[in-house]
Amino acid sequence: MSTLKEILTRRPVAATIRLTVPAGGARPAPPVGPALGQYRLNLMAFCKDFNARTQKYKPDTPMSVTITAFKDNTFEFTVKSPSVTWYLKKAAGIESGSSRPGHVVATTLSVRHIYEIAKIKQSDPYCQYMSLESICKSIIGTANTMGIKVVKDLD
Amino acid sequence: MNSNQTFISAPLGKKMALRHFFKHLTILTSSYGFCTLSSRFIHPSLTTLFNNINPKTQPLIPTKFSLPLSHCYTSLSHPSTSTLLSPYLSVRIRCPKDIADVFSEALMCFGATSTTVDEDDNCDTSNEICIESIFPESEDVDVCILRASDSVGLKMIPSYEVKTGEHYDWIKKTQESFDPVEVTEGLWIVPVWKTPPDVKATNIILNPGLAFGTGEHPTTRLCLLLLQRLIIGGERFLDYGTGSGILAIAALRTSFEAVAESEHETYDVIIANILLNPLLELADDIVSHARPGAAIGLSGILSEQVPCIIDRYSPFLDNISVSEIDDWACLSGTKKLSGN
């Protein structure tokens, strides 16, 4: 929620940049370099910031970053943990979801897995005010669309 | 400035030691991200390089710079620069304005590594907008756009053009964004392609390439301030993970004598401005380069990461203190006189 002061001092936006960057691995190379260079944003400040803020993730975890580039060449960014589908595939050890979700079950996961993913997702911006339970439910929904069955206990 | 002179005119016998110092600095560096000290810098040209130093403004780093070597701090090998300048595809896609956001997300899911949408200023009456997007060269752009269009329910595939990305463009634009920075009173960091704003000040003329340490980053400032407090003259200083070399050069310019005699493998002042994980992993190594009682500065960390660093380093350090700018912190302490 923006305060009045923030609204009044808001800088004009030049562009919105979306990037996938490995945790702790932002460097002056494509895609980060060309994407930020286009708007003359401080590339190294971004790399240093991003890398410092993603130290808690395993190196090379693909993080999704959204950068707001302002017209005065400053920027702000938010980092989201990887997509729920990425976590589900990692947890299940599969490359892709079911080719016919709802008909063919690709694999099964236990609610424990879901709970662990939900805990990570809760630290994302915009998820911090959601209850763990509702995040879990949403993850189970995603799992179902991928043909991943969620059970109470794995046999 | 006197000690600066001392450094330059170091007798022949000490040149090996000097080289040792820089070699060391570079070895530590090259295993880190964003290092720009190319091997050209450490090899015999070193002496020539430093002999060329004039007291005031002068380029301290050869203009020929290699690009950063590696982003992965655990990797000791040198991946070739080709991984950094790997070819990429720049794709410009025209799509309806109202779906620009969802379509960008979809592109990211199906293989794009970046998408950029310019802010819509409402002065343009067309209902289409361009998405600039970057793909790795290996990616099949046609398939990605087809799938992305499908997933957001577009009736027809948007028009797009594919170009091979030019590295020159973004490197040049990035470098243009570096401006001279006054770190403390009378100490300026000036990129080699800009004119020093104050010729009478101590100017560190730097060719940062694309490396860290252009001076404006809070952690660089924290380290430089710490350095200014610690360096009186005659200390042996190690910049662990040097980046653009800014700290080492600043130490030189403030007052620093490189008398790293070969039997002394330890330093009086060590500053490591890297990241949380390498600081935790390399704690033993970093501390092992310090003599007992030496000052150690650790930065590149966020304020919230300070407790982890204190936990890891308190067995080694006394008099721990923390300074902060914005979200960033710099921890300093002195190596314990005895024990470990």
Image (tube, grey):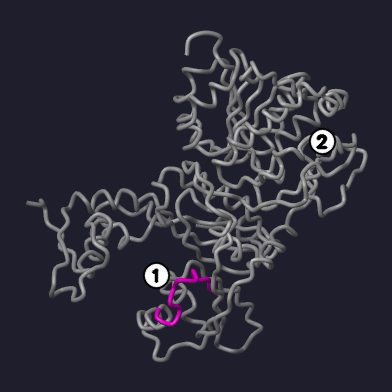
User: On the image, numbered disc 1 is attached to which residue?
Assistant: B109
- Chain label for disc 1: B
Q: Hey, which residue is sitting farthest left in the picture? A: A155
Left or right: B268 as drawn, with respect to B228: left
Q: Is residue A3 magenta?
A: no
Mark 1 nearby-residue class (10 Å; few <14, some 14–19, many ≥20): some
Q: Looking at the image, is mark 2 or mark 1 nearer the viewer?
A: 2
Asked whether the beta carbons under mark 2 and mark 1 sit within 8 Å of each other, the answer is no
What SS does tag 1 mark? Answer: helix
Q: Amino acid at mark 2?
A: Phe
Residue under label 2? B50
Q: Which residues are magenta?
A: B133-143
In the image, residue B161 above or below residue A83: below
Residue type at mark 1 is Cys
Judging depth in this view, the residue of B161 and B262 nearest the camera is B262
The residue most toward the right is B200
Taking depth in this image into account, of A31 and B148 the one nearest to the observer is A31
What number is the disc on residue A152? none
On the image, the x and y values in percent for residue A99 come to 21, 75
Residue B321 picture location, percent across and down: 59, 22
Q: Residue sitting at 50 percent across and 45 percent down? A: B77
Taking the image as shown, residue B261 lies to the left or right of residue A93, namely: right
Q: Position of residue B274 (x, y in %)?
A: 57, 38
- Name the chain under label 2: B
| Residue shown at 45% from the left, 51% from the top | A23
In the rendered image, residues at marks 2 and 1 fall on the same chain: yes
Would you place residue B339 above or below residue A51 in this image? above
Residue B42 occupies quadrant: top right
Q: Callout 2: helix, strand or loop?
A: helix
In the depicted structure, whether residue B156 falls above or below residue B57? below
Count of picture labels: 2
| x and y, in percent, of residue A125 in the image | 43, 54
